[in-house]
Image (tube, rainbow, N blue to C red):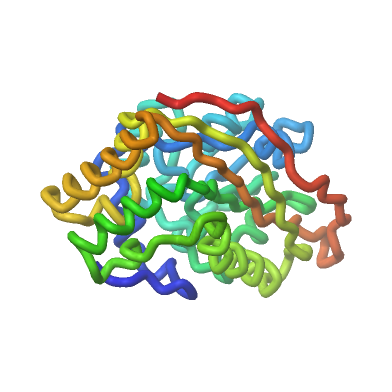
Amino acid sequence: MPTISRNEPHRHRQVAESFGVDAERYDRARPRYPEALVDRIVDGGAPAVLDVGCGTGIAARQFRAAGCEVLGVEPDARMAQEAGRLGITSEVATFEGWDPAGRRYDVVAAGQAWHWVDPVAGAAKAARVLRPGGRLAVFWNVPELPPAVTAAFAEAYRRVAPDSPMAVSAAPGKAEEGYRPLLDLAADGMRRADGLDAPQEWRFAWEWTYTRDAWLDQLPTQGSLTRLPAERRVEVLAAVGAAVDTLGGTFTARYATIAVTARATDGGGRAEARRDPGHADTPRRTHG
């Protein structure tokens, strides 16, 4: 399995296009996004939203529930088909190759997907399809797992795929550091694109409690596992499941949803800066 460059993850699009191998599982198991994030992006209106890399429409459905009109752009036809089954219209294309055909949007959003887009070309294209004052908002769910679960995952990878970057266990409390290159690349792309204001970073903290079965249902939707041979994937899941059993069969993951966002400028001027309120917390939930 090739190592994905921390500086150019968008060049490894074959990983992004592996998620559709089980699109139904992906939609079922992947975590949603905090309502506070959606509300802040929508900003009290009912905007037209373009969801880049919409996948099965997880974020798109949350925007639609907030009253938005949503169109998805998704390079994997299998994911787009599942999104359509769940009520989200999407066009099959990479964002860089997608034809807006003169359409404009109030929001260009990307949940868990912007690292598969060229950060400079993507930001420039977003600026072109946004209405003046519209917002580009790209965001990721960053989980902080119990050390026993993280260590079991890394140890299983050391056995079955020692060349994989997943064979290195992140130090406790350092999960956000692993996402920092993606966040910095997104912000740098926005700074380099004409037509966008200076980027801001938002952070929303929340928790989710997983049962053993729910966590093992989600793991195969991750790019590190979608491309492993089936027998190796089974070995990784068995090791992680055993670790969750030692914790009593459930564990709580602390999540931070981190967004990088910038507004489209109006006629080449600077969009009005808005105060970042810090982070918002959503209630603790159980998933399982």
Residue shown at the point (37%, 29%) measured from the top left: 248
**What residue is shown at x 33% (from left), y 36% (from top)?**
246
Residue placed most toward the observer, 38 or 202: 202
Residue visible at 85% across and 63% down?
270
Q: Quadrant for residue 159, please give it.
A: bottom left
Question: Residue 286 location, x and y as percent?
Answer: 49, 24
**Where on the picture, by quarter, is residue 47?**
top right
State the residue in front, 273 or 146: 146
Q: Is residue 27 visible?
A: no
- Left or right, 284 with respect to 130, comes to left
**Would residue 245 be found to the left or right of residue 116 on screen?**
left
Foreground residue, 220 or 212?
A: 212
Q: Position of residue 249 (x, y in %)?
A: 35, 29
The answer to whether one can see residue 229 in this image is yes
In percent of width and height, residue 271 lies at 84, 58
- Left or right, residue 128 beside residue 237: right
x then y, percent, for residue 14 = 30, 61
Position of the N terminus by quadrant: bottom left
